[in-house]
Image (tube, helix red, strand yellow):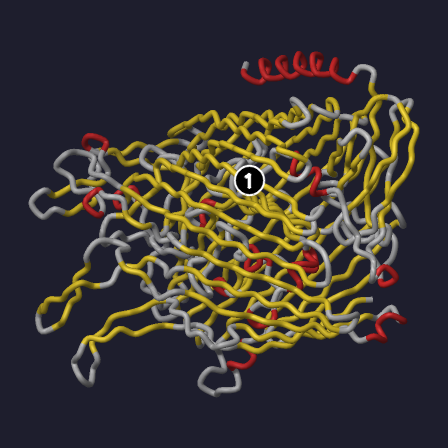
Amino acid sequence: MLSKKLYTLLIVAFTVFNCFSQGKFTLSGIISDSKNNETLIGVNVYIPALKIGTATNEYGFYSVSVPQGEYEIEISFIGYQTIQKSIVLNQNTKMNFAIKEGGEELQEVIVKDNRSKINIKSPEMSVNKLSISAIKKMPVVLGEVDVIKSILLLPGVTNAGEGASGFNVRGGGADQNLILLDEATIFNPSHVFGFFSVFNPDAVKDLKLFKGGIPARYGGRVSSVLDIYQKDGSSKDFHINGGIGLISSRLLAEGPIVKDKASFLIGARTSYAHLFLKFSEEDKDNAAYFYDLNAKLSYKINENNNLYLSGYFGRDVFSLNKSFTNIYGNSTLNLRWNHLYSSKLFSNLSLIYSDYYYGLELDVVGFKWDSGIKNYNIKYDFKHYISDKFKLNYGLNGIYYEFNPGTIKPKGEDSGINPDQLDKKYAFEPSFYLDAENQLSKKITLSYGLRYSLFYRLGTSTINYYENNQSVTFDEDMQIYEKGIPTSTKYFRKNKVIQDYSNFEPRFSVSYQLNDNQSIKASYNRMAQYLQLISNTSSPTPLDVWMPSDNYIKPQIADQGALGYFRNIKDGAYSLEVETYYKKIKNRLDYIDGADLIANNAVEQVILNGQMRAYGLEIMVKKNEGRFNGWISYTLSKSEQQTPGRTPQEIGINNGEWYSSAYDKTHNLAVTSSYNLNEKWSFAANFTLQSGQPVTYPNGQYEYLGITVPSYGLRNENRLPTYHHLDISATLTPRKNKERKWKTEWVFGIYNLYNRMNAASINFRQNVDTGENEAVKLSIFGVVPSVTYNFKF
């Protein structure tokens, strides 16, 4: 019934909106790289006479409707030569463009584009875009180019410490970020427990980070969306590129299957640091490495239809003398069909599979542990270019989840472990959305939309029920929380609905253009997150388990508002972005003291539902042109959590008061820069400074049976020392590359130039020799030099 009403509403809306475009004609097409036919995302199509423009979508398609007439149009994109072309528009016209990179012959020419004019007008805010060429210039630890590490240099983005997994956006947890690779969900974006990301930079075409003002087409997380697209592969010529580093190497091949029609791309990476462990006889059976594979097939059926099949597979292996083995990683597969219904209506249908696996083997105990999460997703998205002043995005999707909290198997005949299967869990999450962008006047542009999401927690499962529906009880005499005791249980058959939720998620943003170079923007969005990561660490670990919302685990609901000032200086040579935001999240999980989360079949007995809030000010100044460019970003912010008592007698967590969340970083400063000295040498540097991470130190001690036991006060009332480091790199491109197909470069880097020993943690212990208590700082990296050899042909 709901679907019929929705379709009827859309048909009526389209009939009305099509009236807007009477008397106008549509110019549309695909914009690609002339060298390899790779479609380009975010290319600007601008008509100076009308001061209107648009940008290509995720598949390189653009569409703009204008009155009949003769116009000069400009096609511009960072790093590419600008095209200016005169056209006579007296009918709907399809015009594809192939643009060239800014080559050596244009070394002294500064290629400008009109992105500044469009960005000032656009209501899009709280969004950061990074080109893969900019990411590759950044110096990183151990010389491995890293997408995740690069976004840590953006305002409002921090990490949970050096070598930590994931990232935090505007005071939110790492589990509150939706990470997409070719539309498929990545549940763990890190290799080697956070040292590297799973994204092969050679295979990445484009990435966007949405921190607020998130479009209605995205859902399922409450803090941010990191949307990454892989390259399609060259359909013109065969190419190979790769790199050899100190601890890892990579290789990517791409080329035509049918010239100008079908192409392939396949890339692989692996690390080999574990080989150094074998130099020691004692450690010859140790291993710590990762490998991953990216693949994509692209097929152009005709002018209106394209097929894509893309996938990713990655694994991490960590082993100690074969007595402890840990294997984990992501797998994804996506089949997509692009169809152009008309010059104004673009569609994309996707069938997506995503899997995160975690495996653990312990020979000492004699058991094998498997866990993970899978989802199957079908989504159909439409982009409707109604007129030059009105655009619609709408679509639907449905995600089916399978959760495996843990399968325990004995390892070997001598094992004393009995096989066990924690209750597998299932869920279904359908959603519908409608999003509009509407230019009301020359100064005011609106974007508004609505997402309607539903969530069904499904059987098979045995559900516990408790007195007064309280799965956690409170002992008033001891003033502590304890596990509740079930009063009854109920078994739900397969696909039987255990609990359901639904939420309307409105989105709104507005841009008011003060003049051609300045605008003020504001946004609001509500988002619902139905999956929870069960973890009491500040940084996600591979052992953490994803759980669906149910009777006791409520969905997180976030409301975020933002206000910003945007300015282009000297015709876009410099830019300034200032934003302030406030975010509040309901139903954020908190854990009782001593919570046991591993292999817990009744995790509801150790969790409480609390709330979060985060607010801050972000400033970003960028230099966009010239030999020397980069940016400075600074964030002043606060992130807090509160879990009050459910009754007047309960104390809650931290006496029910607001306390700093594990992601609270008051100050966050990042400076990144690059300098092209000449054709041969270029240099880059990054500086990062963050407030220390909130932690809980012991505030006293007592003796029990001759053992000194520390006692702890309120949560997160202490902090680690301030975190900072400076990284530099130099890239050498031999001049002889200019005359040959085989091109090479050497990248020399130094991570943490002045050898700052940042604290990953501080542990307290009793010195066995003196008997005195002492604090011990754990630091992961000091100064780390690196060298990488890159090649392509």
Whether residue 397 is visible here, answered yes or no, is: no
User: For mark 1, what is the residue?
Assistant: 565
Depicted 786 relative to depicted 630: above or below: below
Q: Quadrant of the C terminus?
A: bottom right
- In the rendered image, residue 62, in percent from the top left (x then y), is placed at 77, 35
- In the rendered image, residue 784, in percent from the top left (x then y), is placed at 53, 77
Residue at 80% of width from left, 34% of height from top?
48
Give the amino acid type for the residue marked by disc 1 in the picture: Tyr
Is 252 or 732 nearer to us in this picture? 732
Residue at 47% of width from left, 77% of height from top?
755
Q: SS class of the residue under badge 1? A: strand
Depicted 148 relative to depicted 554: above or below: below
Whether residue 446 is visible here, answered yes or no, is: yes
Is 565 or 262 nearer to us in this picture? 565
Q: Determine which quarter of the picture holds residue 204.
A: bottom right
Task: Report the side of 351 relative to 24 (left or right).
Answer: left
Task: Report the side of 754 relative to 791 (left or right).
Answer: left
Depicted 641 relative to depicted 519: above or below: below
- In the rendered image, residue 170, in percent from the top left (x then y), is placed at 45, 46
Task: Report the side of 120 relative to 412 (left or right).
Answer: right
Is 593 or 262 nearer to us in this picture? 593
Residue at 69% of width from left, 36% of height from top?
516
